[in-house]
Image (cartoon, coloured by chain):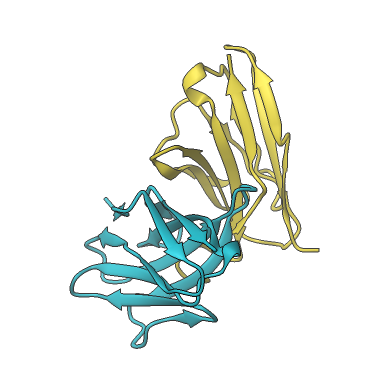
Chain colours: A yellow, B cyan
Amino acid sequence: EAQVTQNPRYLITVTGKKLTVTCSQNMNHEYMSWYRQDPGLGLRQIYYSMNVEVTDKGDVPEGYKVSRKEKRNFPLILESPSPNQTSLYFCASSLDGTANTGELFFGEGSRLTVL
Amino acid sequence: AQKITQTQPGMFVQEKEAVTLDCTYDTSDPSYGLFWYKQPSSGEMIFLIYQGSYDQQNATEGRYSLNFQKARKSANLVISASQLGDSAMYFCAMSANDYKLSFGAGTTVTVRA
């Protein structure tokens, strides 16, 4: 089954404790992206990757890191989480970008709480 | 910078009636794509419909249609014959290049029986 898989789905952590949210897709997609969703703000793009070893900042990259060492994986790293990073996070992928294909495949979301 | 505006935080609609969700956008790029996504209470994001800026006809997908008015920079979603399962949050989004997708704040639709 074609899918984007995120882990963990739910996480409660404390300020400053490094964490990684994994994202994996099995569709051989070139493009992957991370978003955070906050009430009243919709989804905001954190980072995206056009291909292996190619990443770029989205609209809200502060406090996050990413890597794209393999095509299928795009982990999101919070080196020192803070309470303002409490949010619902989505990973998404598409074959070659966003405007061309018309469809972004989303993971199920990861709800992160930083105390 | 791209900007998407959804002015309706919440709406109620009677079952079997049509509902229009407003979306306006702002971009200086001549080529862009417009999208609508549905997010039910379970949280997943479901792609509904896509409209390219150069498409001559309005996009339709089953009960969903996109009312694209380029000069007014609007891309309203019309859901016909609403069903209880249409109750969800709906997001309008735009991409003016291949890699950045900007979302509006969303509109919550509640369908009443």
Q: Nearest the camera: B36 or A68?
A: B36
Query: Relative to residue A7, is residue A17 depicted above or below?
Result: above
Q: Position of residue B70 (x, y in %)?
A: 24, 75
- Which residue occupies 56% across, 19% down? A81
Which percent across, then down, holds residue A28? 71, 62
Q: Quadrant of residue B30?
A: bottom left
Q: Is residue A1 above or below residue A111?
A: below
In the foreground, B5 or A59: B5
Extreme front residue here?
B113
Across and down, in percent, residue A43 comes to: 46, 45
Residue drawn 57% across the image and 12% down it:
A15
| Residue sitting at x 18%, y 74% | B71
B62 shown above or below A10: below
Which residue is the extreme one toward the left?
B71
Pick the residue in front: B102 or B75.
B75
Front residue of B54 and B98: B54
Residue B68 visible, this angle? yes
Q: Quadrant of residue B34?
A: bottom left
Number of labels in the image equals 0
The answer to whether residue A103 is visible is no
Q: Is residue B73 left or right of residue A53?
A: left
Which residue is the extreme one toward the right?
Answer: A1
Where is A82 relative to B12, above or below? Answer: above
Check the picture and name the quadrant holding the C terminus of chain B: bottom right
Residue plotted at (52% across, 29% down)? A64
